[in-house]
Structures are given as structure tokens and as C-alpha cells.
Image: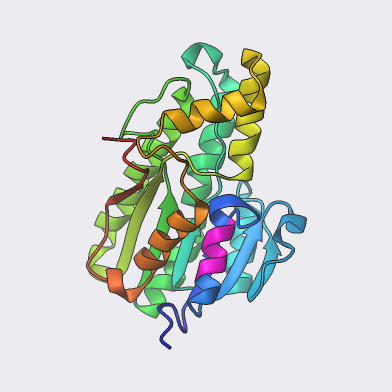
Amino acid sequence: MSYRLQGKRAVVTAAGQGIGRAIAEAFAREGARIYATDLDLAKLEGLQGVERRPLDVRSTEAIENFAKEAGAIDILVNAAGFVHHGTILDCSEADWEFSFDLNVKSMHRTIRAFLPGMLERGGGSIVNIASGASSVRGIPNRYVYGATKAAVIGLTKAVAADFIRKGIRANAICPGTIQSPSLDERIAEQAERSGQSLEAARQAFIDRQPMGRLGTAEEVAALAVYLASDEASFTTGHIHLVDGGFAL
């Protein structure tokens, strides 16, 4: 049996739950040596075949220290993020700064810390989790979230262009509505704001999906495995939708 990521060294942020966890699990099944990181170390419990590390992606010092510990890697997956609900009128200065710091600047920090090691090894794959709510499509009540994820797409394309002749590939995955603990939290918040039941609020999320269902974290992880692998050696600087046709 062949493993698509055999011998590869990878770092996955926000691996404690949802998309990040599914990617870490999928990478492990494909033979990669993984550093699975999360701000809350307890969320990494139960992950098999990985090295678990606490990591605050909002701290440049923490990331630089971790990069020294981990050494040169082949794959970097940036999955940390936060979904702010509301329009521009609901977005305070603090909301804006927090969203951009966690959703965008964290990727700047990790890429800047790990890219030199990738260059020394002669190449690497960077996979950034963006969103269909971005430059791809405007979504109601996703003002600052959409702005940050559009920035992630721009960041990804810039890194891909700058290092395309040095063996570095950078791609962005744009998920649609994916079942995850964070989605459950947003559904609960939506139910509280609207006075709906949890079931009605969840059904509203489902009803807006062209396929009539939510996506799964495993479906996103399958694409991440491909982009991280040598099978995607001619693929860089692009957005890749896993959205059930939501952006059609």
C-alpha cells in the first residue's frame, strides 16, 4: 500500500477540532510525520500518530520558538480562524483587529517562520484555509470574516508567485458550510439571536446549500491531502472550492 505523504514532515494549526483535526488525521493516515497544534492542548487529545503541541498563532514569539523546535518541514497547513457575525455596522475596531490578527496575520507569522526551512529542503507545500465567503462570494453578515478570507487568498497567491521557481507551492482551500464544532456554536448563537429553535436554525443553514446538506471536515481534508502531496506538484497559487456548489 502506498502512502501519499510518506516521509513528509507537516505542521497543522488549529488541529484540535473541525477541519484542522480532520486534516491532521488524514495526513497521519497517509504516512506524514505531523506536529498537530492548537491553542488549547486538551483539544488535541485522542489524535493518533501525531506530535501534539500547544501553539498560540497570535504570538510571533511562540511561532518562532516552535519553528526552531520543529525544524524544517515539507507541509504547512494554516487552519486557525474565527467567524465574526454581522455587517460593517456590527464590526468594532476590536472585532476587525482580532479577526485580521487570527485569520490573516497568523498565516503571515507561520509562513514567515517555516518558509526558510522549506527553501533549504528544496520545496514545500503551503495550504491555507480560506472560505467561499471571501473574494469568491459575498455572504450576508460575514463582513469582516469575508474581508479576512479574501486577504488569505491574496496572501496565498503572493507567496505562490514569489517562490514559484524555488519549489514552493501555496494554495488556498475555500470551504462552504462545513459541519464542525464551530458551526454548532454559530447555529446556537443564530438560534438565540433569532428566537428560533436549534433545529430550525440548523435547517436554515442546510436549506441554503445547493446539495441540500452540509459538507464534512473529511471532504475538506481529502483535498488538503492532494494539495500537500506530490500529485499536485503542478498546482500552485489557486483557490480550491469545497462548497457543494454554494458559489455557483
Q: Nearer the viewer, residue 114 or 205?
A: 205
Report the residue at 37% width, 38% height from top.
132
24 in relation to 182, above or below: below
Q: Residue furthest bottom?
A: 1
**Relative image position of residue 170 (x, y in whole percent):** 34, 58
133 in relation to 32, above or below: above
**Relative image position of residue 196 (x, y in whole percent):** 63, 17
Q: Nearer the viewer, residue 197 or 55?
A: 197
Q: Nearer the viewer, residue 75 or 21?
A: 21
Q: Quadrant of the C terminus?
A: top left
Q: How is the image coloured?
A: rainbow
Left or right position of 199 against 74: right
Residue 37: say if magenta. Answer: no
Left or right position of 66 against 100: right
Q: How many numbered dots are placed on residues in this image?
A: 0
> Overall secondary structure of the magenta stretch?
helix
Left or right position of 44 against 89: right
Q: Residue furthest top?
A: 89
The magenta stretch is 21-26
Report the residue at 65% width, 27% height from top.
198
**Relative image position of residue 108 (x, y in whole percent):** 47, 49
Q: Quadrant of the N terminus?
A: bottom left
Q: Residue furthest right?
A: 42
Q: In which quadrant of the rendered view does residue 199 lie?
A: top right
Q: In which quadrant of the rendered view does residue 63 lie?
A: bottom right
Report the residue at 50% width, 80% height from top.
31
**Relative image position of residue 61 (x, y in whole percent):** 64, 55
Residue 72 shows up from this direction? no
118 in relation to 103, above or below: below
3 in relation to 34, above or below: below
Report the residue at 32% width, 30% height from top.
137
